[in-house]
Image (cartoon, grey):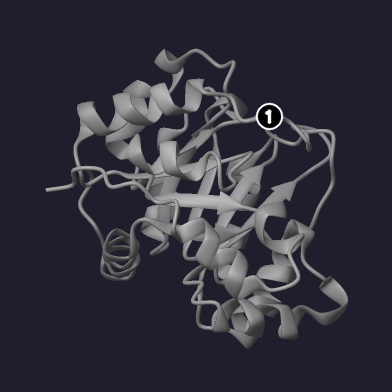
Amino acid sequence: MPELGSRTETTVRFLRAARPTILPSLLLCDFANLQREVELLEEAGVEVLHLDVMDGHFVPNLTYGMPLVQSLRRITELKIDVHLMISDPAQYAMQFVDAGADSITFHVEATPDPEPILARIRGGGVAAGLAINPTTPFDELLPHVGSCDLVLVMSVAAGFGGQPFNPIALERLSHLRSKFGPELLLEVDGGINADTIGPATASGADLLVAGSAIFREADYCQAMTRLRCKFQSVNIP
């Protein structure tokens, strides 16, 4: 695991202390009432917000960018976790650092050499990680894990909604936890709900991204409580 700078270290320690924790994916929130949505999530005990950034090229959907991170940074002190589903993370990652992100992951599929980008993100004081799609060979990720603060294991193909949870994510989480130990933060994204959050945490997931399981519910506090009740313990020394 690389040596941490002060801001990066603060974020990583915060996330380790919070685990397991649920990260609401703001893709489904009411953007016309963004500040109120964030306030409701804070009242529900949320500690980290998750932003899915899509460029319409690496994945077929197009979402928000740096201005949303800047807006959130002005209205909340919650940690902001940015997931870059974009073709050129080297060009844009530092703009998200400057906008106020606390952690940034980008896809191993998006670049032939992720190491310089990871180093630049971490050099900017932000926790850095790699994401991997379910169909991507695991060997493309493993050589770079030692340079990551976190790894995002996708349990659906990035950028496509309405997909069922792919159990290969559980195998990958278990393997990463066993091979790299408790220091590495493990994130999972896609199809996380009351049925899948228990197996995911039991397999070693620390950061669990949830969208419809929160935002399709009328009461965010109740939705978060239902999900937290399904956590299963994993041995983290």
Residue 112 in view of the camera: yes
The answer to whether residue 211 is above or below residue 107 is: below
Q: Disc 1 marks which amino acid?
A: Pro
Q: Position of residue 124 (x, y in %)?
A: 42, 62
Q: Position of residue 66 (x, y in %)?
A: 70, 64
Residue 80 in view of the camera: no
Residue displayed at 56% across by 81% down: 42
Pick the residue in front: 209 or 119. Answer: 209
Pick the residue in front: 15 or 123. Answer: 15
Residue displayed at 44% across by 58% down: 229
Q: Position of residue 106 (x, y in %)?
A: 55, 41
Instruction: Give the quarter of the figure containing the N terminus.
Output: top left
Q: Position of residue 190 (x, y in %)?
A: 62, 39
158 on left or right of 76: right
Q: Give the labeled residue for mark 1.
A: 164
203 on left or right of 108: left
